Structure formats: C-alpha cells, structure tokens
Image (spheres, helix red, strand yellow):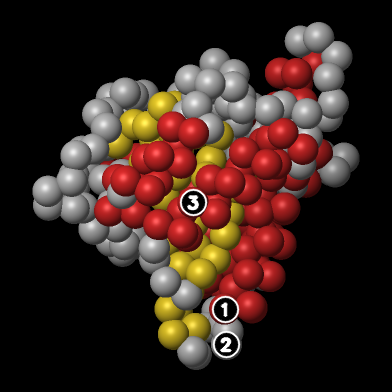
Amino acid sequence: MTRYLRRQGHAVAFCTVDRLMRELGLNGAVRGRKQRTTIPTKDGIRAGDKLNRDLTAAAPNQVWVADFTYVSTWTGWAYVAFVFDAFSRAIVGWTTAASKTTALVSKALNMAVWRRDHYGHPVEPGLIFHTDAGSQYTSVKFTESLALQGLSASIGSVGDAYDNALAESIIGLFKTEVVNRHGPFKTLTEVEFALMEWCGWYNNARLHSRLDYLTPAEYEAAYYSQMSPRRPALV
C-alpha cells in the first residue's frame, strides 16, 4: 500500500500507512493453505525436471510455469488454470471450467500462446513449459500439444511444492485477493468474470517487490524498450 501511494504522488512513510490502516480497521490480505488439486499418474511416462527449482528467466518467453486450482460455487466446483511467465511473473494464460481435465490446461496454454503472438512477442521453439506431475499435464494429448507448438516440457517431482513454487505463490494471491474476499460465487460464469478482471489488474496494476515495485506489464515493457523497437509488451 505504501509503495502504491508513493506512485500516486503521496509522500508517506511505512509506519504512517501502518498506523492509519490499523486505525481504520484495515488489514492486508492473509493467505490460506493451498489444497492439493493435481493427482499424478501411477504409470505414465513423463518429462524430466529441466529447471531444478530455478524458476527464473533472463527474458520473457523463456520459461513458463503452469498450475490450476479450484473455487467453490453454489452449483459445484470451478477449476481455474493459469500460465505464468517466469521472467515477469505475468499471467499470460488463464481459463475456467467445471472439470479438471486435459482440456482445461490445454485451453490456458493455447490462450497464452495466442496472447503472446497477438501482442507482438510470439513464442519461439525451445520455451520451457514447467508444471507439477498432475495427470492433466503428463497426458499424451497435452504432451503432444506442447510438442506441436515447439515447447519443451518440464515436470517437477511428485509431492514437492517447491518444484512449482512460482505458480503456487501467484495462485495463492488469487485465492486470497479474489476467492476469499469476493466468494462464495454462485456460478461458473461469476468465477470467469472475477478471474478476467483480476488477471487484468494483476498484470497492469499490481506492484511486485521482486520486480523492483513495477507491474508485470511495466517490467516487460522496460525489457523490450532495450531491445529493437517492437509492439507494446504483454497486455
């Protein structure tokens, strides 16, 4: 909050903001525990871990990480899949469905590829696509989809949250800032609209300490401004 106010031109100290928030009864968002959603296959052949917990990248479109979570609605579960860029922590793909199938994660992947191409930064062969060992990501159909687009699959070890810590961290923000604050949702459609709105805000307005207190869109724009002139970054 202090960083945000300073960006708006207000000269405030951390202690002042903390005191005023306490006086107004305001608190920062508190994260809950992450629930397990992906179930590994027992006999599937899967790709190895190409990152070894190094969830960083020197440029956009070098490493993407993906995962999904679930949201309770009055009509049943809604599953929300994400694709993140490890360089800027941007959400490049997202989708929602009523079941946790390969189609769910494939749709998020296809959206990520389309958006990067649409905004002038198409994916090139060799991009590492890192996920956990869930059956949706290790399925033959999804593996073939990655291969057709020239992406290199990377699968973390089973039962180790640190192998996909970046995805779990951002999903934790989604659960804290959207689900816990605005739920319960009545329908899948309500989740879809909340997801779309939050992703736009996250990419274009949310400040990140790991990005020198820039937004993901600003961080990528700064990178591309140092390269040859191209179309605007990300969103």
Instruction: Write down the quadrant of residue 22 in the picture.
Output: bottom right
Compared to residue 35, the image places residue 169 above or below, namely above
Q: Is residue 134 left or right of residue 93?
A: left
| Numbered mark located on residue 188 in the image | 1
Q: Is residue 77 visible?
A: yes
Indicate which disc, 1 or 3, sits on the residue closer to the N terminus: 3
User: In whole angstroms, how far apart are the C-alphas of marks 2 and 1?
Assistant: 7 Å
* Residue at mark 1 to residue at mark 3: CA–CA distance: 18 Å
**Does the rendering let one see residue 167?**
no
What residue does disc 2 label? 186
Q: Nearer the viewer, residue 152 or 184?
A: 152
Q: Viewed as shown, does residue 189 lie left or right of 47?
A: right
> Where on the picture, by quarter, is residue 124?
top right
Q: Position of residue 19 (x, y in %)?
A: 63, 57
Q: Please identify the quarter of the rendering in which residue 77 is found.
A: bottom left
Query: At x 39% / y 66%, what residue is drawn?
Result: 100
Q: Residue placed at 87% from the left, 40% from the top? A: 9
Can you identify the residue that label 3 sits on?
A: 106
Amino acid found under the numbered disc labelled 2: Lys
